[in-house]
């Protein structure tokens, strides 16, 4: 065998090892590290903080945190979390993390006016920021690297299309947090594509008895409502109870997915759900911050990284049920 041929053979063999065996070894190491609660990288122990507009006891944000924490383990990140549903208080929490000189921030912009100044402060301080879940339309202007979530208007439009497919005529959109622009966008998007009539009702989301009584009263006074659209998974079950108490046969549909919603879809208590994959929002936000600090990577090319919407029906629920029970969907 000539020297040239031998070199070519060896080069091919080495390339094969690099493309397959090496890649498999890296993937195996990452899996083993995640399973054992150990980092899969040797970068410094950076600290990332997430601050959301969640109220107390919101299971949606438990799923977001689950994804973020899993990515943090893999990426050797110390992960901090804080939340407040009031915009002013949320901004104060972000400021406290800026003062602590964290290495990266993940924030939601449900109330963008209250958050604008503090996000710009983080950017000026050299702290990379990624926005998640809400605020896609202002994320870039505020100085964030990118946004991870769903476009709420597009998600709403998908709901309107689905209601039309189902032949619905009159829907009640239940907004559980006043001032949350994302919730308004969901209702407005649905109204845009829905051929029927869409009406809004505002409720106090932190008071479930009030939510139930408000929906119940509306269904009793307007028998023409054939759909109740809730904008968060915890409110779907409450809406179902309200419909039962009101003697209404209105279909209950909801944004977001959890174990209760998956079960309700399977037993026809709910019509459909809109999944935006909250686990993925948390996971990708941490991962993208790590990539930016490690390799100056920015994903999205200036556009949001979309995690939804996906319309989930009874046909899909069984497959996703096991994931919802473990808290990742």
Image: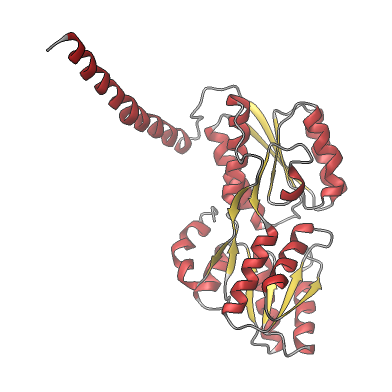
Q: Is residue 288 left or right of residue 55?
A: left
Where residue 25 appears, as percent x and y from the top left, is 36, 29
Q: Is residue 160 above or below residue 120?
A: below
Q: Nearer the viewer, residue 126 or 137?
A: 137
**Outermost residue toward the left?**
1
In this view, 163 is above or below 53: below
Quadrant where the N terminus is found in the figure: top left
Give the side of residue 179 with respect to residue 272, left or right: right
Q: Determine the residue positioned at 48% across, 29% down.
A: 40
- Give the quadrant of the C terminus: bottom right
- Residue 152 is situated, as x and y percent measured from the top left of the image, at 69, 59
Nearer the observer, 185 or 216: 185
Residue for point 64% across, 87% down: 249
Q: Quadrant of residue 269?
A: bottom right
The picture places residue 65, in percent across and down from the top left corner, at: 63, 46
Residue 251, image x and y in percent? 62, 81
The colour scheme used here is: secondary structure
In the displayed structure, 164 sits above or below 111; it is below
Looking at the picture, tell me which residue is in the foreground, 329 or 14.
Answer: 14
Answer with the quarter of the image where residue 167 lies: bottom right
Q: Nearer the viewer, residue 126 or 10?
A: 10
């Amino acid at each position: 065998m000539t020297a040239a041929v031998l070199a070519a053979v060896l080069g091919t063999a080495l390339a094969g090892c690099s493309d397959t065996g090496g890649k498999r070894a890296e993937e195996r190491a990452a899996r083993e590290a995640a399973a054992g609660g150990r980092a899969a990288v040797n970068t410094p122990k950076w600290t990332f903080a997430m601050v959301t507009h969640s109220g107390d006891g919101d299971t949606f944000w438990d799923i977001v945190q689950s994804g973020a924490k899993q990515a943090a383990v893999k990426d050797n990140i110390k992960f901090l979390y804080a939340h407040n549903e009031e915009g002013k208080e949320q901004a104060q929490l972000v400021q406290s993390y800026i003062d602590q000189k964290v290495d990266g921030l993940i924030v939601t912009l449900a109330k963008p006016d209250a958050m604008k100044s503090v996000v710009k402060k983080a950017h000026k301080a050299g702290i990379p920021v990624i926005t998640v879940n809400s605020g896609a339309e202002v994320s870039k202007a505020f100085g964030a690297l990118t946004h991870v979530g769903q476009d709420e208007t597009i998600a709403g439009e998908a709901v309107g299309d689905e209601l039309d497919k189902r032949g619905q005529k009159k829907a009640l959109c239940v907004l559980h947090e006043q001032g949350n622009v994302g919730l308004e966008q969901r209702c407005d998007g649905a109204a845009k594509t829905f051929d029927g009539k869409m009406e809004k009702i505002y409720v106090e989301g932190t008071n479930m008895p009030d939510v139930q009584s408000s929906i119940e009263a509306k269904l009793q006074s307007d028998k023409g409502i054939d759909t109740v659209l809730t904008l968060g998974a915890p409110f779907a079950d409450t809406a179902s109870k309200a419909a039962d108490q009101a003697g209404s046969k209105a279909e209950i549909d909801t944004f977001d997915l959890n174990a209760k919603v998956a079960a309700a879809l399977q037993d026809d208590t709910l019509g459909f759900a809109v999944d935006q994959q909250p686990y993925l929002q948390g996971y990708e936000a941490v991962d993208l911050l790590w990539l930016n600090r490690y390799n100056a990577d920015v994903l999205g090319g200036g556009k949001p990284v979309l995690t939804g919407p996906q319309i989930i029906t009874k046909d899909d629920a069984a497959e996703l049920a096991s994931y919802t029970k473990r808290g990742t969907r």
